[in-house]
Image: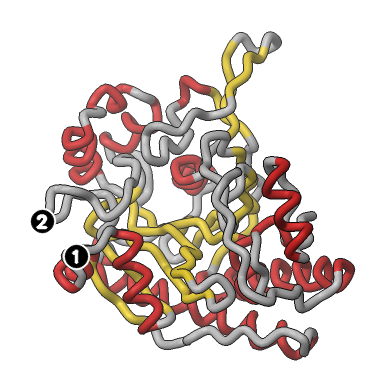
């Protein structure tokens, strides 16, 4: 069986029908408010891209994309892992200008995901990307953007509780900011996930800056592909989940690589061969806009606000038989 945690005396706060209504409320309310807060326009996005385009997200480098041949096209396609690169190209093609951006519903399959209460092979998130100036490529701009996102999360949660008084999730509005190196120094004997837990349990809502590059212990805080986020200007948004007693990652985001940081990170990662791919060539030649962007987990946001114990309570996916049986025994309704 995959990892499964059953909270003591757990009971769903909503029945199946009201669960579906609450999911719709969260998704509708959050995306409308996110669009207004960050000045984003909704666009349609691909479910798959060609393998040769280099547009798919390589995540940590070991996950296998779902691939298939397309006889009518004569190429192979890949189901997207995320739209990190596609969004930036779309901003150029759609001629977005500084201060404006896009968001889209992203659906993906991550076949190699290790399954537990918050991980599924099915990924649904709001992917967003916004054009910025070179002068805005700063930690201060990153933090300001995250504060706006956290504000939208908290507003959505408070509105949800008005329509669904059975729910009682409280989310801390005040954002605590720390770098991954500072976190390592604070808890030098703990693993990165243990460090996140200790910090977020105390501060409730946090931004951990600096994901992907090696820290003073020689290891990165967490894996991050070298060709979309600038490792010194990115971060993860984590919120304390009381139901599961965990630091729940809601968003992975950051200011994207420019020409210099892309070349440097490709070299560090031993991925310099990617420089010849169409997307990377455009970026290295300065043909793509400078951007900030990220993904915000739809199901994770729903399960947090609704006090759910398992992500399968707010999305329909595939689980091993033992997990299904254990959840049934514990009163956890998997969709």
Name the foreground residue: 7 vs 178: 7
Decide: few, some or many residues near mark 1? Use Cα within 10 Å; few <14, some 14-19, many ≥20.
Answer: some
Q: Nearer the N terminus, badge 2 or badge 1?
A: 1
Question: Dot 2: few (<14), some (14–19), or many (≥20) neighbours within 10 Å?
Answer: few
Proximity of marks 2 and 1: CB atoms separated by less than 8 Å: yes
Q: Is residue 224 left or right of residue 110?
A: left
Q: Which residue lies furthest to the right in this view?
A: 17
Q: Would residue 161 appear left or right of 175 to someone viewing this image?
A: right
Residue at 61% in and 38% down: 109
- Position in image of residue 241 (x %, y %): 53, 74
Query: Which SS class for mark 1?
Result: helix
In the foreground, 89 or 208? 208
- Between 242 and 82, the one lying in front of the other is 242
**Quarter where residue 74 is shown:** top right
- Residue 272 versus residue 229 in the image, above or below: above
Residue underneath mark 1 = 184
Colour scheme of the rendered structure: secondary structure
Measured Cα–Cα span from mark 2 to mark 1:
8 Å
The residue at 45%/33% (across/down) is 63
Q: Mark 2 points at which residue?
A: 216
Q: Position of residue 97 (x, y in %)?
A: 45, 57
Identify the residue at image location x=15%, y=55%: 215
In the image, is residue 76 above or below residue 144?
A: above
Q: Where is residue 212 in the image (x, y as percent from the top left)?
A: 27, 49
Q: Which residue is drawn at 12% across and 53% down?
A: 217
The quarter holding residue 183 reads bottom left
Mark 2, secondary structure of its residue = loop
Quarter holding residue 162? bottom right
92 vs 169: above or below: above
């Amino acid at each position: 069986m995959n990892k499964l945690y059953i909270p003591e005396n757990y009971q769903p706060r909503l029945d199946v029908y009201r669960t579906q209504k609450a999911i719709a409320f969260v998704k509708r309310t959050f995306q409308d408010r996110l669009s207004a807060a960050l000045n984003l326009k909704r666009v349609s996005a691909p479910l798959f891209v060609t393998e040769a385009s280099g547009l798919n997200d390589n995540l940590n480098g070991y996950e296998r994309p779902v691939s298939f041949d397309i006889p009518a096209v004569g190429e192979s396609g890949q189901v997207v892992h995320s739209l990190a690169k596609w969004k930036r190209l779309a901003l150029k093609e759609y001629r977005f200008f500084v201060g404006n951006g896009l968001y889209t519903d992203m659906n993906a399959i991550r076949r190699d995901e290790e399954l537990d209460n918050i991980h599924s092979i099915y990924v649904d998130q709001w992917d967003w990307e916004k054009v910025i100036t070179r002068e805005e490529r700063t930690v201060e701009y990153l933090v300001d953007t995250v504060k706006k996102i956290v504000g939208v999360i908290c507003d959505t949660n408070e509105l949800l509780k008005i329509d669904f008084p059975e729910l009682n999730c409280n989310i801390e509005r005040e954002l605590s900011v720390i770098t991954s190196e500072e976190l390592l120094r604070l808890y030098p004997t703990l693993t990165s996930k243990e460090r996140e837990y200790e910090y977020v349990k105390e501060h409730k809502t946090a931004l951990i800056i600096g994901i992907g590059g090696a820290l003073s212990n020689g290891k990165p805080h967490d894996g991050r592909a070298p060709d979309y986020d600038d490792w010194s200007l990115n971060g993860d948004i984590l919120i304390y989940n009381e139901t599961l007693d965990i630091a729940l990652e809601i968003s992975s985001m950051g200011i994207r690589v420019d020409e210099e940081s892309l070349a440097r990170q490709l070299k560090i990662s031993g991925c310099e061969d990617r420089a010849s791919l169409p997307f990377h060539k455009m970026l290295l030649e300065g043909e793509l806009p400078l951007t900030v962007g990220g993904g915000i987990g739809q199901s994770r946001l729903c399960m947090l606000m609704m006090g759910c114990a398992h992500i399968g309570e707010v999305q329909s996916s595939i689980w091993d038989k033992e997990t299904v049986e254990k959840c049934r025994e514990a009163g956890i309704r998997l969709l």
